[in-house]
Amino acid sequence: MLPLIAVTDVVKEYGAGENKVQVLSKINLSILPNTLVALKGRSGSGKTTLINIMGALDQPTDGKVLFENSDIGQLSEKERTEFRRTNIGFIFQSFGLVPLMTVEENIEFGLRVAGTPREEWAERVQDALEVVGLTKRASHHPFELSGGEQQRCAIARAIAPSPSIILADEPTAELDSKTAFQIITRFKKLVEEKKTTIVMTTHDPAILEMIEHVFELEDGKIA
């Protein structure tokens, strides 16, 4: 089976000269389709940088990132934007919700950005709300939600368009242990039933025990 994403000898550096900092060093990694993968490591190990490069939010200094055998590192800014819009669902630590939109409208906004036909919105929104357990909070705004509920809204927005891959940066960090367990269980169900691929970062040992495919980053390298 061909990998959905293949990372080959990826290096990421910031700055120049004496101020140059290497965040990733010769990373090699393959993500197979229909899998739930965790990247673990301490803060500063390079997890978020690697997620951003796999999602074409950032470009490697050296090396290649192939998505379905196409080198996304060589795309123009406009092409990268289109690639993200049509292929990737993002879940950020900062939630990234639109404050003036309700939960339902935030999910609809994600569908609009992804180019999902409008006639599919209502069903997809309801399905996503059910997955994260927010059906009763659909008409609330982000400021009326707890941190955990905002995170679940961000997850619903990411999964509603059924992207090829979901990239999640610490998606359970703001959740209590029970809700975190439920979200990972739902992630696994998405992989099994919807044929989704999910790559997430975490350093939570309890969460890592639930995930079969785990890669550890240490000082910018795969440990």
Image: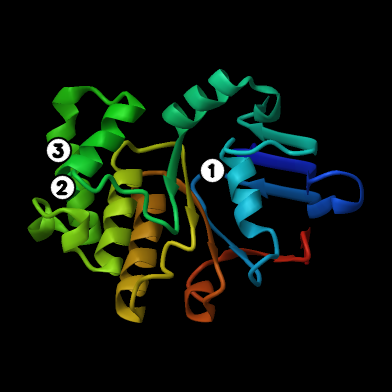
Reply above or below: 13 against 147: above
Q: Secondary structure at mark 3?
A: helix
What is the three-letter code of the residue carrying label 2?
Thr
Whichever of labels 2 and 1 marks the residue nearer the N terminus, that label is: 1
Whichever of labels 3 and 2 marks the residue nearer the N terminus, that label is: 2
Tell me the quarter of the picture where residue 76 sits. Answer: top right
User: Are circles 3 and 2 on residues that touch, CB within 8 Å?
Assistant: no
In the rendered image, residue 18, in percent from the top left (x then y), is placed at: 91, 52
In the drawing, does residue 134 fall left or right of residue 83? Answer: left
What is the three-letter code of the residue carrying label 1?
Pro
In the rendered image, residue 195, in percent from the top left (x then y), is placed at: 41, 44
Whichever of labels 1 and 3 marks the residue nearer the N terminus, that label is: 1
- Of discs 2 and 1, which sits in the foreground? 2
Residue position marked by numbered label 2 in the rendering: 102
What is the three-letter code of the residue carrying label 3?
Glu
Q: How packed is label 1: few (under 14 Cα within 10 Å), some, or many (20 or more)?
A: some
Q: Secondary structure at mark 1?
A: loop
- Residue at point 41% right, 68% down? 172
In space, the residues marked 2 and 1 are separated at their CA atoms by: 33 Å
- Of discs 1 and 3, which sits in the foreground? 3
Disc ID at residue 33: 1
Q: How packed is label 2: few (under 14 Cα within 10 Å), some, or many (20 or more)?
A: many
Q: Nearer the viewer, residue 127 or 13?
A: 13
Disc ID at residue 123: 3
Tell me the quarter of the picture where residue 171 sits. Answer: bottom left
